[in-house]
Image (cartoon, rainbow, N blue to C red):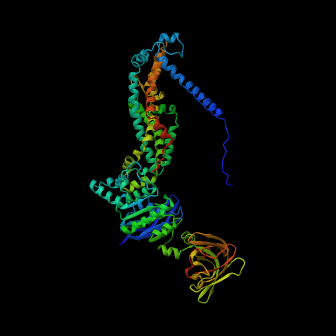
Amino acid sequence: MTDTSYAPPTQSRGLKIALRWGLYLMLGVFAVWYLLPLFVMLTTSLKSLEEIRTGSLIALPREVTFDAWRTAWSGACTGIQCEGLQPYFWNSVMLAVPAVMISTVLGAMNGYVVAQWQFRGANIIFALMLFGCFIPFQVVLLPMARTLGILNIAGSIPGLIFVHVVYGIGFTTLFFRNYYVTIPAELTKAAKIDGAGFFRIFWSIFLPLSLPIIVVTVIWQFTQIWNDFLFGVSFSQAGTQPITVALNNIVNSTTGVKAYNVDMAAAIIAALPTLLVYVVAGKYFIRGLTAGSVKG
Amino acid sequence: MSHILEVDGLFKSYGATEILKDINVSIDKGEFLVLVGPSGCGKSTLLNCIAGLEPITGGAIRIAGQDMTEVSPKDRNIAMVFQSYALYPTMSVAKNITFGMQVRGVDKATQSAKLADVARQLQIEPLLNRRPGQLSGGQRQRVAMGRALVRDPALFLFDEPLSNLDAKLRVEMRTEIKRLHQDLGASMVYVTHDQIEAMTLATKIVVMKGGIIQQIGTPHEIYTRPANTFVADFMGSPAMNLIPARATPNGQGSVIEIAREGAEPLRLDEPRHAGLSGEILLGLRPEDMHEATARAGEALQGGAVRVDVVEPAGADTYVVARLGGKEVTSRLSADTQARAGAALEFGFDLSKASYFAPETGERLA
């Protein structure tokens, strides 16, 4: 049995090329299908109300105007105030940035402990935290409102930060734990013998390894917190509302003619930060989701 | 108090599972102790207990005369080399080696002096600025050794440090570790599942199975006088032949009767041991079964046995035959006359034989 040559099934060159182009055509069609809403949003936001009324939905603007963007940012009315999205945008920034940072740091510490310092009951605690990921938002609304009241941070941005940190810990712990569990336990042992303690090992050995998973966690948490509506609408009051709530108010509180161009511009403004975070860090996002192993 | 390490009545259990049972072992300064056994025998757990990485359930551990049972790993004056090397992946080689000193607050000048010293000793000077990921297996091994050496500890601990290397490199590093031990005169505890590593490196071997010490002795004692059939079978390659036989007392000695296929049983005189009687296991190393025509075999008692398989291995030829209903392997010279299917005249060197009880496996004589 020395004949090991293998004849692949023959396929004509022409057929191959046709199949390849057919594939590209399909992908192209799907891409256009998915991009169409974004296209309509963008073009609509650049049209004047007059043009929207008279023109076609998918036509390019005859005359590009940024009036709608200006209105959405600083002039649109959310109920009785007419300051646009601007103040709410900063509310969201002041809410999302600390909440993301705190929940990421806590998740990293938790993950490190659960993965590398096996104590009695570690798995039970991890299972409970994991369970926290599956609790629907609605279930915690009432108890959380009570808790915020007791802590005297109801209706404030710190209150919202607290809510998002608590709700995020389950996810961030899961991310970091699954990442750290792939790091050989011998690394911790070696560092212990070298004399390093709990925090030193975390700081000098684990954190420098963690960039991919930190990026994943930050993207995930930022997207969750920035896009959150339910907590934002439940636990805020006038002046502390996040951008998602303001967007809703702009869209739903117009009187008379619906300013589609302003609505579209406002929606894009509200979505931009998450888009930006993903574009900047997306490379690490994919890497962090798939990798995690340390070939030392 | 010349003992560097004393393990005294050590017990270790996880919940209800006992991992280590009543471990008593001690070594003197400069000794090389090898813990050997099949996987799951508790040897690595014992090493981790000595290092202080695993809490123990009972007993005591003393290092250099001090009770270390409750002392944390960093204060035990030990250094450890791990199977995966456990180099810190984000640090350079130099940082890996000096990390311990940095943590302990040793001043910079001493750090770099010691680093230079160790780097020269292990010939890793060109690697100092690289990351572990950029090193080959053998180089990582050296760096891991460097990290241990720079500590200059009372006791070195090695946890299967060679098992991730390929066969050729493993033999080289084995020699290097042995040389290091000779040069430093350091005390070492070394865990391996490889009995050849154990034989070549150790000044003292502990054979373990199921969390119980089977035998403690020098490599020579372990090899020539195994305490039971487990040790006899585990140490040595090919393993010691354990041939079912029948002993009858005979004045000063005994007569050993071994069944063979298609012929009368072999009858051998054992003048050294008078107490043997009934069913026994005759333990005979492959090299103690000779070809009767060869020089060493002529004076020995023996008989013809039909050969089943002949396996030339270069320097030696392994010849497999059936005795007492079991396959036995003998190590003969490369120019042996043995042919598969033909009978061969064997001579048995009973002066090197061991005898075991078939039921308990314990050594009788």
Percent from the top left, x then y, of residue A263? 47, 18
Specify whether residue B174 is in view: yes
Specify whether residue B12 is in view: no
Percent from the top left, x then y, of residue B121? 35, 62
Q: Is residue A215 left or right of residue B37?
A: left
Q: Which residue is painted at 48% across and 9% down in the image?
A: A50
Q: Is residue B114 left or right of residue B344?
A: left
Percent from the top left, x then y, of residue A77? 42, 16
Q: In front: B352, or A243?
A: B352
Q: Is residue A152 above or below residue A268?
A: below
Q: Is residue A177 above or below residue B351?
A: above
Q: In front: A154, or B202?
A: B202
> In terms of image quadrants, where is residue B79?
bottom left
Tag count in the figure?
0
Instruction: Specify the farthest residue to the bottom.
Output: B251
Percent from the top left, x then y, of residue A68? 44, 16
Q: In front: A107, or A21?
A: A21
Q: Is residue B15 above or below residue A219?
A: below
> In terms of image quadrants, where is residue B286?
bottom right
User: Which of the image's four quarters has the N terminus of chain A?
Assistant: bottom right
Q: In front: A146, or B51?
A: B51
Q: Is residue A148 above or below residue B12?
A: above
